[in-house]
Image (spheres, coloured by chain):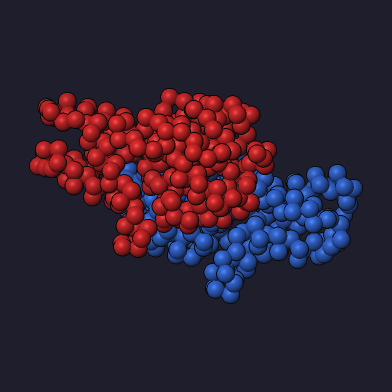
Chain colours: A red, B blue
Amino acid sequence: MQLEAIKVVLFDTFGTLVDWCGSIASLGQRLATEKGINGVDWDAFARAWRAGYRPGMERVQSGQRPWTPLDVIHSERLDEILPEFGLGSTFTEEEKADINLFWHRLDPWPDSFAGLNRLKRRYLISPLSNGSLFLLVSIARRAGLPWDFILCSDTFKAYKRDDAVYLGAINILGLAPQEIMLVAAHNDDLASARSHGMMTAYVNRSTEYGPDQVRDFEAEEDWDVIAETVEELAEKMGT
Amino acid sequence: MQLEAIKVVLFDTFGTLVDWCGSIASLGQRLATEKGINGVDWDAFARAWRAGYRPGMERVQSGQRPWTPLDVIHSERLDEILPEFGLGSTFTEEEKADINLFWHRLDPWPDSFAGLNRLKRRYLISPLSNGSLFLLVSIARRAGLPWDFILCSDTFKAYKRDDAVYLGAINILGLAPQEIMLVAAHNDDLASARSHGMMTAYVNRSTEYGPDQVRDFEAEEDWDVIAETVEELAEKMGT
């Protein structure tokens, strides 16, 4: 473990820093109250929306379709699930565009803000996220996340776990891989980072998917740091 | 003038926000004092170093050489000018690497910090600079520049005035060109931005190059905003 050499700490965002499921469910419930919509399980709605995430990215990664930003993948999946929840004709196109921006308004887990601010004392910090640039900066502005810069799918025109994202991050920083750490709640993301020589930190978010969680209940390899929260990570990183 | 529609304000950095000439000269003078080096005109040294900037980028832009980060262009030019200033055998390779990082330690003009903080109240702000990502984040950290994110030559693997930079910025933001403003002290940079539909603001830095200044003494077109400082720009942008 050579934590001393690390200069930049990169963060997976969805699930690792922000609670997408709770945030989408809460925003949906608020909209339903405003519009007098009853009987929708917004927690299930959030998870159904998210279920289109990996398949949507895989169609890009496999070359089935050209580069497509995440906001478009979100929007297409929204159109798919609205009828499944009895909302097929409830919203105008403009309202649907607003609902798609729920993903720009995700709330951090309670420990993310304090942990990032502590880590920033010693390290440069940035997301390394599949989110779009505008999505990530919108979340950061709402929550006060103190990014030094933002690396994301739009930067590399590729989605994790595509090698292009990890190699792109190493290249754009002009650093040795072992000077860069990826923090994630997902073992496969960390495995990809490690395969390219990056340092790794696992933060446990075993409730991210609620009842749909099927993996990432714990660290599955000897990641360089393993923590329950971003604050504990900051502690273990000496900040 | 439709300033109301603007969401993101992008900034040229060298010259527009930071005083590269004064900073390099001052860092050189400090090093000379430490090492007991006499008789070097560090102001002329700074300008000679900078004189390799455009030619270095043009070799990339014209396709004469593949993508080359700005730190490499700076380093090559440093090797050229050291003998010209009687410093051909003064420094070790490690010392030369440190000197090359003078460009990561440029000081802002006195109005930059306050102006950016005011603009940030209403707009998302980022550089759109030929600097490297690490250079820009290093300057930001030292000076406390409050960037929301960082767009630079490394993001697009291209240098301004290449169309790829302006089009890349519009594309990565997912906004209409008229929702994005470029701020620069250089008329040709603004002309390129305007040719792609972006809004433009000129900040006057007519002393940037000292005695080498041959242009950009004033706004040469009816840019959307014309100001003497970033603070005056912030005022005119309603922040």
- When asked about the image quadrant of residue B110, the answer is top right
x and y, in percent, of residue B223 in the image: 42, 54
Residue B60: give x, y in percent of width and height.
57, 69
In front: B101, or A132?
Answer: A132
Residue B184's place in the image compared with B148, above or below, is below
Q: State the residue at coordinates (57%, 35%).
A: A225
Query: What residue do we see at 41% from left, 55% from top?
Result: A158
Relative to B218, B6 lies left or right:
left
The quadrant where residue B154 appears: bottom right
Which of these two is toward me, A219 or A88?
Answer: A219
Coordinates of residue A70 in the picture (x, y in percent): 33, 49
Q: Is residue B58 above or below residue A143?
A: below
Q: Please name whichever residue, A132 or A159, is drawn nearer the observer in this view of the structure.
A: A159
Residue at the outermost bottom position:
B64
Can residue B23 be spotted in the picture?
yes
Q: Is residue A169 visible?
A: no
List x then y, in percent, for residue A165: 47, 53
User: Does residue A52 appear left or right of residue B46 in this picture?
Assistant: left
Looking at the image, is A72 positioned above or below residue A112?
below
